[in-house]
Amino acid sequence: MRRLTVLQLLPALHSGGVERSTIEIADALVRAGHRAVVVSAGGRLLPALLATGAEHISVDIGRKSLATLRHIGTLRQILLREKPDIVHARSRLPAWLGWRALRGLPAPLRARFVTTVHGLNSPGIYSQVMTFGERVICVSDSVRGYVLKHYPRTAVDKLRVIPRGIDPLQFPPRPRPDPAARARFAAADPRLGGDGPLLLMPGRGTRLKGHADALQLLAGLRATGVDARLWLLGTDEPGRQAYVAELTSLAEQAGVEAALIIAPPTAAIADAYAAADLVLQLSRKPEAFGRTVIEALAVGRPVVGWDHGGVGELLAQLQPAGAVTPFEQAALLQAAGDMLASPGPALASIAPYTLASMQQATLNLYQELADDPRHAAAS
């Protein structure tokens, strides 16, 4: 395998799945003896990127402004100087800029173009650029189906499903329940202690995450005599005070306010899974993948979620009993009750969804494309 230079394009390095995947692939490239270069506006994750041995070039290629178009020329100069074998675009505006920059170069000087469809973006011309790669990585079969549905002219043979993955060492199996983990969180918030079942729903403070559905589930469980509590972890964020107040009001109306814990994000998410008895994934909008499902199952916690998008896909493969027809509250209550009544951990093999598998599959794709003698420009 010859040494490759891979240049990844994304708006910035603040937080999120796109940023995490960029750093993970940069790390894999460097460890495999390749050269990793990232172009972005930088951000708080820049030190983590540089710690992998990757290089960073600071260009604001994610700002939605006509002035950003000037960076087509900037990128073209970077491409001529850095001579990458692969250009990998992970977001729509950087993809447009990178695609235009490549097309302005003579064919012999063009790097091969790869895109990753990380999300179920609104279909249209702006999003279509993510299908322009000579290889198009889809983070789930759900994403692949979405691409083919909305962009039927996309060549099927250039689509590659490479699921996102986790490091199993960061999410080792834990006893269920794990009293030590529960006690650590209860030391900071006593409401998290006790012997009753604890439902964990990690996610940002937005209605799309389905917090109202989780509150209905909590009320339903308590009405059947289950002393359940609901932990909305990550919902209490800066700027979300009005939404938190709305959820508190809903809980009061349902009579479950004393059993509701709304908390800020935590870096100790594996411990949070261990402290819980059941994990909820109730996003109202289908998600592209569903990392929460993999993390929770790796720790040994059952998951209940709406059966759509990447979450439904993962549950169907790994824990079918947790997949619930979207928005059917009675079915959700039944599934959650069954899971809570089931003794012992819900262990599932997450082998296809490990970080190492994702990294190796991506590097194999780069090598495949770099070694392909055909050099047709992306359309």
Image (cartoon, rainbow, N blue to C red):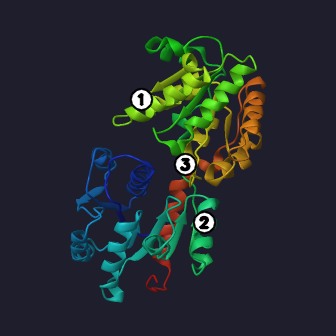
Check if mark 1's residue and mark 3's residue have beta carbons within 8 Å.
Answer: no
Q: Work out whether residue 190 or residue 332 is closer to the camera in this orientation and state it.
A: 332
Q: Within 10 Å of the Cα at label 3, are there few (<14), some (14-19), or many (20+) other Cα atoms?
A: many
Give the alpha-carbon distance from disc 3 to disc 2, as whole Å. 20 Å
Q: Label 1 vs label 3: CA separation?
A: 24 Å
Earlier in the chain: of badge 1 and badge 3, it is 3
Give amino acid for label 2.
Answer: Tyr
Instruction: Identify which residue is drawn at 57% across, 24% down.
Output: 253
Residue 91 on image: x %, y % = 40, 63
**Residue behind mark 3:** 165
**Mark 1 belongs to which amino acid?**
Pro
From the viewer's perspective, tell me whether residue 73 is left or right of residue 225: left
Q: Tell me: residue 375, above or below residue 317.
A: below
Occupied quadrant, residue 57: bottom left
Please identify the quarter of the rendering in which residue 215 is found.
top right
Instruction: Say the numbered circle drawn on residue 354.
Output: none
Judged by depth in the image, the label closer to the viewer, 1 or 3, is 1
Q: Which mark is residue 264?
A: 1
Q: Name the residue that disc number 2 marks.
A: 146
Does dot 3 land on a helix, a strand or a loop?
loop
Residue 21: x and y in percent read 44, 53
Q: Residue 33: percent from the left, percent from the top? A: 39, 59
What x and y, as percent, mark residue 82?
26, 71
Asked if the residues shown at circle 1 and circle 2 are in contact, with their CB atoms under 8 angstroms apart, the answer is no
Amino acid type at mark 3: Gly
Q: For mark 2, give the secondary structure.
A: helix
Specify the farthest residue to the front: 253
